[in-house]
Amino acid sequence: MPNPSLNRPTQAVILAGGRGTRLLPLTATRPKPMIEFHGRPFLEYLLEQLRDQGVNRILLLLGYLPDVIKDYFGNGERFGVSIEYGVTDVNDETGTRLRAARHLIDPVFLLLYCDNYLPFSFDAMWKRWGEIEGDALVTVYANEDNYTRSNLRVDSDGRVAVYDKSRSAENLQGVDIGYMLVRRDVIDLIPAGNPSFEATVYPQLIGQRRFFGFLTRHRYYSVGDHKRLPLTEEFLCSRRTLLLDRDGVLNRKRPKGEYVRSWRDWEWLDGALEALRMLRQSGFRVVLLTDQPGIADGVMTERDLADIHRRMRDDVERAGGHIDAIFHCPHGQDAGCWCRKPAPGMLYQAQRTLHLDLTKALYVGDDECDQRSAAAAACPFRMVGNGASLRSIVAELIAHQPETRLSGV
């Protein structure tokens, strides 16, 4: 049977005790989650995210330079959370830290690594938890872009089939990034000695078929090594972003079965150019996502599309606006590709290219396919039509948007 009904967890346990040797010399005087981005430590971004998702009780499991973290965060009150600490020897592995803190942990809790940040929906994860018969549900990055080396494989039934901490097994596809719902009783599987939780407990859960994966295609960001730091710096910046469909949002949509094949077919919608100017003046990044099946149908070419978009951008620049990036799907309506809406592929293309936080961006479209695409990527959505134009949506967005945010809009 699926998991019984439980109250949604409010406690997160964060493993934050390692030395962070891959980040030397940055970690010579501070733990890796205290590395700063835009004037704030990485761990602060994590705590803010958890608070906003309704997880307001935090247990930090520390080892290396614990007072650096404790002195900064205290009891968590000024960050809107309640913080407890479990401090063990700096040489302790993750299993030992969890075993020592068992008495402080709730029956079901959210387990995180201190060096990974993933935009996630706890509501969606909790819904999935209620559907499975398992003891742990780990968030897995699909890794279709080979962002890093995979360390596990999830079967078609959603169960984790293989975990390999060394990342050397064949046919691995996916990365364990934490953000894991766990039953406290799982801690009892940790063997004696000083073991790694992942290396010793994951195989047991896999053998019992009690270990499930929660797949995400939204890239995660980390302080795991030096090469990741510039990407994380960019991701955590305060650049607000608006994602736009094209036809029916910027320009008048052609009748069904017809396409904007050349600039002669283009007709700006009232207020669209002004909306783009307002967005630029307010510091928004603008990204276009457009299906263009006319290419697959043979009625236009990639060169034709590039010419349309060049002329479109020229008009936008003359009006005082700017379009930062354009992503298009050239496939036919029955191609079954990942990029054609309502599939979310173009949103993830934009996310990975521009290091967006899709959960804090806004996508504006004109039909149900746009809406479904946004929902599949957990991206907020607004629809034009029924009296709502792009200009009116932008005006409302600017009027109600705080000037400073972590990322996105």
Image (spheres, helix red, strand yellow):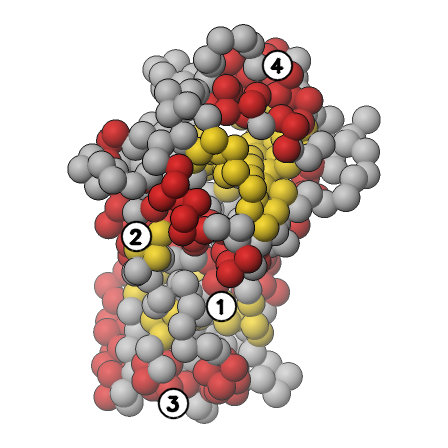
Q: Residue tagged by mark 2?
A: 36
Query: Sequence order check: which comes first, mark 4 or mark 3?
Result: 4
- Residues 280 and 234: in front is 234
Whole-number angstrom distance, CA of label 4 to CA of label 2: 36 Å
Q: Residue tagged by mark 1?
A: 362
Q: Is residue 72 above or below residue 306?
A: above
Whole-number angstrom distance, CA of label 4 to CA of label 3: 61 Å
Relative to 109, 140 lies left or right: left
Residue at 18% x, 37% y is 25
Q: Mark 1 near mark 3, Cβ–Cβ under 8 Å?
A: no
Relative to 73, 264 lies left or right: left
**Residue 33 image position (x, y, % from top left):** 36, 43
Mark 3: amino acid? Glu
Q: Is residue 198 above or below residue 378?
A: above
Give me the disc on residue 274: 3
Q: Is residue 216 above or below residue 123?
A: above
Q: Residue tagged by mark 4?
A: 189
Mark 2: amino acid? Glu
Disc 4 versus disc 3: nearer the observer: 4
Residue at 78% x, 39% y is 6
Determine whether the residue tagged by mark 4 lies in a helix, strand or loop.
Answer: helix
Q: Residues within 10 Å of mark 3 (few under 14, many from 20)?
A: some
Inspect this view and state whether residue 236 appears: yes
Residue 157 image-quadrant placement: top right
Determine whether the residue tagged by mark 1 lies in a helix, strand or loop.
Answer: strand
- Residues 224 and 89: in front is 89
Q: Mark 4 near mark 2, Cβ–Cβ under 8 Å?
A: no
Residue at 55% x, 46% y is 83
Mark 4: amino acid? Leu
